[in-house]
Amino acid sequence: MNPATHCAGHILAIEDDPVLGAYVHEQLGRSGFQVTWCQNGKDGLALARGEGFDVVLMDILLPGMNGLDVLQHLREHSATPVILMSALGAEADRISGFRRGADDYLPKPFSVDELQVRVEAILRRVALERRRSQGPVRPESDDLQFDDLHFDVTFAGRAAGLTRSEFRLLDTLNRHADEVLSKAFLYQHALQRGYAQHDRSLDMHVSQIRRKLKAAGYQARQVRTVWGKGYVLSPGEDA
Amino acid sequence: MPGRHSLFWKLVVLLVAFCLLMIWLSWSWGRYMETQNAFLSSEARQALKGYAAQAEQAWQDAGTEGVDRWLAAIRQRENGWVAVIGPDLQPLGSTPWTAAQSQRLTFLRGLEWPVSRRSQLLPWMRVPFPHDAGAGSLVIELPERFMPGRYALLWHLTITGIIPGVFTFLLCMGLYRLLIAPLNRLREQANAWRADPLQGRLTAQATGRGDELGELGRAFDHMAERLQSTVALQRQLLRDLSHELRTPLSRLRVAGDSEQDCARLRDRVQREVQGMQRLVDDTLQLAWLDTERTAPALEPIQVQALWDMLAENACYESGWPSSQLQCRVSADCWVQGNLNALAQALENILRNAIRHSPPGGVISLAGRREGDQWLVWLEDQGGGVAERDLERIFHPFIRLDGSRPGDGGFGLGLSIARNALARQGGTLWAQNSGAGLRLNLRIPAAYNSME
């Protein structure tokens, strides 16, 4: 557990269930993360405060100290991203989790793939935010003009009329052109919140972006759905 | 101002009438008793007249001597001062007046005069001889026992204390019967529910009243009705859920007992777990929609964009070509709703339509503006359902057999859709369109939709 080597992603998992905890520990470890596993809320809080973790993965129902309380105490000193896990899938729990500063919420049961996607989305967002200070890098867009001032794109002099969220989303997709971005990452980065199963706002924004780009006459590239993975901005099939 | 049937008016009438009655009673009875207590009783008058007759007799029989004798005799019986006087106010007996007596003789009372209770001394009564009033009179200090108003205190107490007390007691009994007895019935009813789960209802007498207590009774019954239906729904859900869970569980058990191939077993476990998770999620969702009372956050939603999103998903899931899912709703169709709930409702309806469509069937969405609302309908070509089932398909875990093509699902989709729509102020109902089933959604229009 050497904090110096956490460039690959150092994760603190606070989970009291021995089976699930061991499983998460093993699977994430296999994916190349360095995982510290702790079974108790108080110890977890002490660890999270002490060492420099990249992500904290935490159950809500914990012995010793409730996960939401741990989160609240942690937020007094640290901005370490936190993913809450819980079998309490109700909207109210998710909302109170986000309100106390959680970065994502993962309802149990979940697959390791999903967990990994979310952890990566958060790590990536953190990395991007660190890089952002060095100045934006924008791939040359031959035809679509991004207007940061008015949060809109124009094509051949015609504004598409995007909303702010739609603009941020398209901007993110454009910066990573031809790269499939996971929904978890897009929620984190463009909409600045965690992804939930029944949340359709991202899909709706994409649907609107497609309609607006089409209305503006832009057909060179389009936002395409990659099933089970996410979205990508790439040259359209019928272009 | 309270309504015509309000308890307020009952209380006003009752209390005002009671106050007026009390004031009138104490005033009129008080006056009556006052005058009654100021005059001599008829018994006292009889006795005094009797003395006067005796004195006249004595005077006529034996003159001064007779009067002296009679006076001596009467003083044995009465303690007060007694004299017999002539018309000139001089004694008919032999004893002359003292000065003080002369003084008092100037103010004598007749028998019919009221007697003041304020003077310290007992009053002197003048009773003329009954046969010859001119011949003389008897003057007698009124004996204590004849003094009127001896029971005045008692009467006073009765009129100002006991009678108002009794009347107030009666009023309180009336008020208690009017106000508290119905509340006691409510309490008994609430207690009765402990033993019998929400079956009992209040009597028609308790709920038929026009006033606030009647309203309370009706609200109480209404609450019981709602509670009962919620409890019944939850029980039904739980029963159906455990029933539905048993099927995959028993399949898993059989597979665990007999399946030898590890890869196939794993595949089977994953499939069943997925199905069970979906079942539990849907049931929880339905229960949550049914119990959640806070209003969802509403936003304007463009139905076309929503449909694009759902149709893309549905085509991927079902492998349908997108040409079979048609949208005839105009671009100005903006509704005011909760995105996730509306998407879920429409998605469930769409999935249901796809599941029950014949191969190559077309599903179309159309809509028109009706006042402040949009009426949007989704039509399939699956042949529709029997008229009597048009409402039943919205009940949880209802799966119609045979008549329509397609299977799968737990029968929760349409219940969830209806509840999700109801939460954002919409309605959902089904009708047969001839070729298939037509599901109608009525949703409030968003502010910026065109007229």
Image: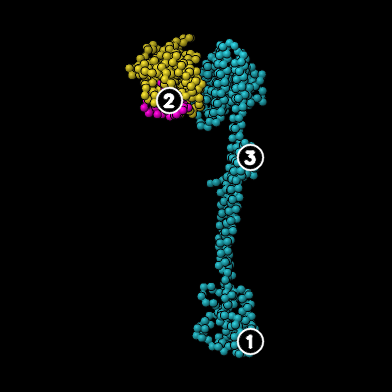
Q: Residue at x 47, y 14 (%)?
A: A229
Query: Please, what secondary structure does the residue beneath circle 3 have?
Result: loop
Which of the chains is cyan? B
Mark 1 belongs to which amino acid?
Ala
Q: Is residue B360 magenta?
A: no
Which residue sits furthest left?
A134
Q: Residue A103 at x, y = what percent? A: 42, 23
Q: Residue B425 at x, y = what percent? A: 54, 29
Residue extent of the magenta highlight: A55-79
Label whose residue precedes the other's in the sequence (3 or 1): 1
Quickly name the residue at label 2.
A102
Q: Residue at x 57, y 84 (%)?
A: B83
Query: Please, what secondary structure does the residue beneath circle 2 have?
Result: loop
Chain A colour is: yellow
Q: Residue B218 at x, y = what percent? A: 60, 40
In three-dimensional space, the C-alpha distance between marks 3 and 1, rounded to whole angstroms, equals: 90 Å
Residue A30 makes an appearance in the image: yes
Quickly name the residue at label 1.
B58
